[in-house]
């Protein structure tokens, strides 16, 4: 078992509180409907994405450290792929996207040293752009796709699914 949960009652309380806060934060944002197509021009969409990704990254890290269960599904994970960096699973994907949204200067925003392509959003199925040999597209009518450099992440297929899995993994520790 993870030593933090066994170290003292106050540490146990803090860890549980952090987990519960992150769960409530994500659920609260999602329940607002901020990610609906009708909200596409809402100036709070991008801050909501950042907030959700920060808390989701925290939950995924705790799932791996406390529950010893990495969230490792690979469905619909593909880089738009010119770099040698390989995204292994959804945990790796969420960590990379969280790092991109929290660090505007990150290399993760760039297609090459002269092209910055970041925080673009596509609602539903379609093609957002074609740059050189990269096609920025979403394959699903029922999802929202976010692009950061060569990385894309889906709201339902990655973010919400990983969130549900993290909650399931951490439930016994609450």
Image: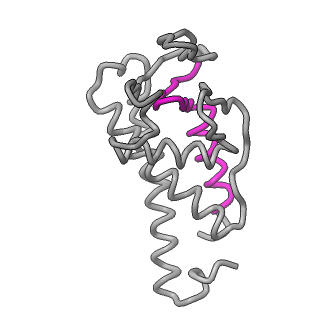
Give the left or right position of residue 135, taking residue 31 as reference. right
Residue occupying the point 57% across, 39% down: 160
Would you identify the image quadrant in which residue 4 lies?
bottom right
Give the left or right position of residue 74, taking residue 157 as reference. right
Q: Residue furthest front?
A: 113
* Residue 50 magenta-highlighted: no
Query: Is any atom of residue 131 visible in this view?
Result: yes
Q: Residue furthest bottom?
A: 8
* Residue 169 magenta-highlighted: yes
Residue occupying the point 62% across, 30% down: 79
**Place of residue 58 in the rendered image (x, y in percent of width and height, measured from the top left):** 50, 58
Identify the image quadrant of the C terminus.
Answer: bottom right
**Place of residue 3 in the rendered image (x, y in percent of width and height, measured from the top left):** 62, 83
**Residue 35 position (above or below residue 100):** above
Q: Residue furthest left?
A: 43
**Place of residue 77 in the rendered image (x, y in percent of width and height, measured from the top left):** 67, 33
Would you identify the image quadrant in which residue 110 lies?
top left
- What segment is highlighted magenta in the picture? 142-170
Identify the image quadrant of the N terminus.
Answer: bottom right
Viewer-nearest residue: 109 or 17: 109
Residue occupying the point 59% across, 14% down: 141
């Amino acid at each position: 078992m993870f030593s933090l949960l066994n170290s003292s009652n106050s540490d146990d309380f803090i860890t549980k509180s952090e987990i519960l806060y992150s769960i409530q934060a994500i659920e609260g944002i999602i329940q607002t409907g901020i990610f609906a197509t009708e909200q596409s021009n809402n100036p709070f969409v991008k801050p909501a994405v950042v907030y959700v990704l920060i808390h989701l990254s925290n939950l995924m890290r705790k799932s791996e450290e406390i529950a010893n269960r990495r969230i490792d599904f690979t469905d619909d994970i593909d880089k738009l792929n010119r770099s040698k960096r390989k995204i292994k699973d959804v945990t790796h994907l969420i960590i990379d996207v969280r790092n991109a949204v929290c660090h505007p200067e990150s290399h993760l925003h760039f297609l090459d040293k002269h092209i910055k392509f970041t925080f673009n959003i596509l609602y539903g199925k379609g093609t957002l752009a074609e740059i050189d040999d990269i096609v920025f597209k979403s394959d699903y009518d029922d999802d929202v796709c976010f692009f950061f450099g060569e990385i894309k992440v889906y709201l339902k297929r990655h973010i919400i699914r990983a969130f549900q899995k993290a909650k399931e993994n951490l439930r016994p520790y609450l």
